[in-house]
Image (cartoon, rainbow, N blue to C red):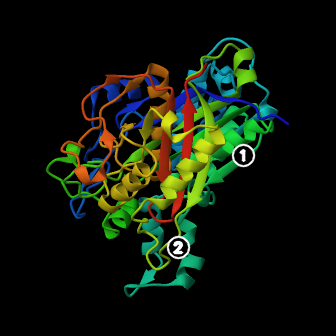
Amino acid sequence: MSKRRVVVTGLGPVTPIGVGVDAFWQALLDGRSGTHRIESFDPSRFDSQIGGEIADVRKVNDFVPKGYRKAGKIMARDIELAVVAAWHAVMDAGLRTKCIIERADAEGPQNLDSARFGANIGAGLICADLGELSEALAQSTTEDLFSLRIWGNEGMQNLTPLWLLKFLPNMLACHVTIVHDAQGPSNTITCGEASSHLAIGEAYRTIERGTADVCICGGAESKANPMALIRQSLGKRLSTRNDAPESACRPFGKDRDGTVATEGGGLVILESLEHAQARGARIYAELVGFGAAHDAHTPMQPTTPHPEGRGVALAAQKALRDAGLANADVRLVVPMACGLSVHDASEAAGLRSLFDDVPVMAVNGGIGNNGAGTGAIDFIAACLAVHHNTITAAVNSDPLDTECGLNVVLDGPVDAPVDVALTTAYALGGGQNAALALKAFR
């Protein structure tokens, strides 16, 4: 049985530099940064007091049917981001789903079969509502000691019966599929920063083998909250340039000192080529290869990447082999590159082992690290680079760490034929690696 061709028809970025495909792409062209001193809570007691927050996304009810608005009460921030990203992706693709029709966002009947509409969404460790949780914990404490007996009898009574539904990772996909009536195969992937690439790869396989015609996929996460910030801080992953938040995250930069905890992500629409052409869809790029690998070399230090980028290189090789492409065919690489010294060095080493002087588009200097959503943003940027034949300049990477040995584009945007692009991702703490290969649609 021949494999079906898979194309990208809709992009739904939700990022600190822009929400929606037009705003996001313009921000990349302009070289904007979306990181600043955190405003949603007082960060003054944290070593790192900076983050990337999305002020434009505060009312999830603007992106769901009227009859679904009560569900907003059980949506954590990560879920809200996914629901907003889904609306943007579906609208950008010109799909008329149940949500779009009920909201009258577009005219005409439904133009896809809900039973063959799948979803694969990456998610992270969702932060609990500290206001609600802390009150319940306080009432379970006696003489400065937490009591499980009191918690079970009284403390838990302070939580809404549906409290847990806010914080289950699969609830991103749950709400998105309900809102848009996606009845096809659905899955949630929780592999840190590799989640989006793995989710997109899974959706690609689902369409390729004929199990679905359309999939919504990607990921979202919010790390701009106290619990995520303290976890990242204790792991020594965050930049402490509190006096210069806009330039704190410096991918492949010579003086990089850590990443920035942010929120965001994106969802994209993948379709079989036949389905997309039948409805006259605009095609951004063709997804032609997917590869995954695991970098399990130091069991005692699982957060330390292989110094030669073994996992990244292996995933990239698999993606290119899957696509039937040679290393020399690649015209652009979009890496994760989040500003962490040893991780940037590892990823650079893995890419150097495969490519010689290929342009590298590092997009996370103005975006930071939002965990499960990071890869989706990189993938969307890669799609747009292929679609526009344009490479945007890295933000905050100048002066470049010459030891990285990569051709990172520092001045731009640059007009260039981007016939083939490769984007890579890795999980900071789990060793998962993934890569996706894109071609200009012909």
Whether residue 52 is visible to the viewer of this picture, yes or no, is yes
Label 2: how many residues lie within 10 Å, few (<14), some (14-19) or many (20+)? many
Measuring from the top left, give residue 410's x and y in whole percent.
Answer: 25, 35
Three-letter code for the amino acid on which mark 1 is drawn:
Ser
Label 1: how many residues lie within 10 Å, few (<14), some (14-19) or many (20+)? many
- On screen, 124 above or below 69? below
Quadrant for the N terminus, please: top right
Measuring from the top left, give residue 151's x and y in whole percent.
Answer: 54, 78
> Along the horizontal axis of the image, is 121 left or right of 340?
right
Whether residue 123 is visible to the viewer of this picture, yes or no, is no
Residue of label 2: 155
Helix, strand or loop status at disc 1: strand
Looking at the image, tell me whether mark 2 or mark 1 is earlier in sequence order: 2
Measuring from the top left, give residue 429's x and y in whole percent.
Answer: 46, 65
Q: Nearer the viewer, residue 90 or 390?
A: 390
Helix, strand or loop status at disc 2: helix
The circle drawn on residue 132 is none
- On screen, 340 above or below 381? below
The CA distance from mark 2 to mark 1 is: 35 Å
Three-letter code for the amino acid on which mark 2 is drawn:
Gly
- Determine the image quadrant of residue 230: bottom left
- On screen, 347 above or below 373? below
> Along the horizontal axis of the image, is 117 left or right of 226?
right
Residue of label 1: 186
- Determine the image quadrant of residue 391: top left
Q: Nearer the viewer, residue 373 or 399?
A: 399
Q: Nearer the viewer, residue 155 or 240?
A: 240
- Is label 2 in contact with label 1 (beta carbons under 8 Å)? no
> Along the horizontal axis of the image, is 205 left or right of 2?
left
- Which residue shows up at 47% across the image and 72% down it? 302
